[in-house]
């Protein structure tokens, strides 16, 4: 008896139209995105180095000349790295004019020290670039970013005004404690008036701190309001889901009642009315 051919060995011809097309590879990220991804952490580390190099001579003016020179050199080296990073990103951008228009803060951060080579302006440039790096990270939440911005502006605003005001005639901000207290009252827009800058740069810095404080407080308020609104919306959505489920259940009950009424009318038409109570007769009752 001839053996039955094994169906597992048979292969049906495959139509060319149903053949699986090769999976398309995702396009590689632009060169600018790859550059920013690889340089984000090193630049953030250099920003921290800049912060330390700026703070040490301000907190302790009596440091040795060699350490003072090293700190000053470090601030300029870090600024040069930031400037080179901006130049490279500008070169890698597909639309350079659009890059300049959308990175105005970065451009100001690079050009400020050249307009007036003061360490105060170098501090502003480092803060701007550090803020760009922080906002570029997707993991950083808005609340964390606002809190970090408040802390950075508070501490370095105090250091900046101390550097500007210390040693000036008629200046009443002479110690680090006074500068920290003044920066706190200025950012919170309280302004007790017991301490105030007397120099032009000090007052310019005060204006910047007041504007920054108002903006950051507005962000905090908006963030809290958004959280409350999201909670209310979540509860409202849950209540709407429950209401919709109740409406669906009501529709199903109405449909079942309609089906039962139809069955009763059909049985009444055939002369076999259901017993009292709406019970349907079983097989035994039918035989009787």
Image (cartoon, rainbow, N blue to C red):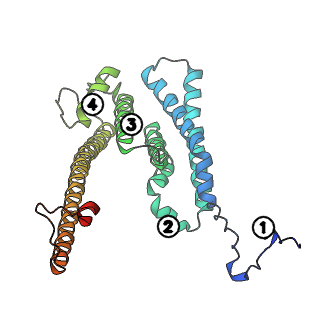
Report the Cα–Cα distance between label 4 and label 3: 15 Å
- Which numbered mark, 4 or 1, is in the foreground of this view? 1
Nearest-to-viewer mark from 2 and 1:
1
Marks 3 and 1 sit apart, C-alpha to C-alpha, by 66 Å
Question: Dot 4: within a 10 Å radius of its alpha carbon, few (fewer than 14), some, or many (20 or more) residues?
Answer: many
Instruction: Classify 244 as above or below 52.
Output: below
**Percent position of residue 116, x then y:** 46, 46
Residue 136, above or below 282: above
Say which label, 3 or 1, has the lower sequence index.
1
Residue density around tag 3, few if under 14, some if 14–19, many if 20 or more, within 10 Å? some
Q: Give left or right: position of 166 versus 185.
A: right
Q: Are marks 4 and 3 in contact (CB under 8 Å)?
A: no
Dots 2, 4 in contact, CB < 8 A:
no
Q: Is residue 114 above or below residue 182?
A: below
CA gap between label 2 and label 4 equals 38 Å
Q: Which residue is mark 2?
A: 98
Q: How many marks?
A: 4
Q: Which residue is mark 3?
A: 148
Which mark's residue is nearer the viewer, 2 or 3?
3
Label whose residue precedes the other's in the sequence (2 or 3): 2
Task: Choose between 163 and 93: the one closer to the eye.
Answer: 93
Q: Which disc is residue 8 wearing? A: 1
Q: Write down the quadrant of residue 248 in the picture.
A: bottom left
Left or right relative to 95: residue 153: left
**SS for dot 1:** helix
- Where does residue 286 sit, x and y in percent of width and height? 25, 66
SS class of the residue under badge 2?
Answer: helix
């Amino acid at each position: 008896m001839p053996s039955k051919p094994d169906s597992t060995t048979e292969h049906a011809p495959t139509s060319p139209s149903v053949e699986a097309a090769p999976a398309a590879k995702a396009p590689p990220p632009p060169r600018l995105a790859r550059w920013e991804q690889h340089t984000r952490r090193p630049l953030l580390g250099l920003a921290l180095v800049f912060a330390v190099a700026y703070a040490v001579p301000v907190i302790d003016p009596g440091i040795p000349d060699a350490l003072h020179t090293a700190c000053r050199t470090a601030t300029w080296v870090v600024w040069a790295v930031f400037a080179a990073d901006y130049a490279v990103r500008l070169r890698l951008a597909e639309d350079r004019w659009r890059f300049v228009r959308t990175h105005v803060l970065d451009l100001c951060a690079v050009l400020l020290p050249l307009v007036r080579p003061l360490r105060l302006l170098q501090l502003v440039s480092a803060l701007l670039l550090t803020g760009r790096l922080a906002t570029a990270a997707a993991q950083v939440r808005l609340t964390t970013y606002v809190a970090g911005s408040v802390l950075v502006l508070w501490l370095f605003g105090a250091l900046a005004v101390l550097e500007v005001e210390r040693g000036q005639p008629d200046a009443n901000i002479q110690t680090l404690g006074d500068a920290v207290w003044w920066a706190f009252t200025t950012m919170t827009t309280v302004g007790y008036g017991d301490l105030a800058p007397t120099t032009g740069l000090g007052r310019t810095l005060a204006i910047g701190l007041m504007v920054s404080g108002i903006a950051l407080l507005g962000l905090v308020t908006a963030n809290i309001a958004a959280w409350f609104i999201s909670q209310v919306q979540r509860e409202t959505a849950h209540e709407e889901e429950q209401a919709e489920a109740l409406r669906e259940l009501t529709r199903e009950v109405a449909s079942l009642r309609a089906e039962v009424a139809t069955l009763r009318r059909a049985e009444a038409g055939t002369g076999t009315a259901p017993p009292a109570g709406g019970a349907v007769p079983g097989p035994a009752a039918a035989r009787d």
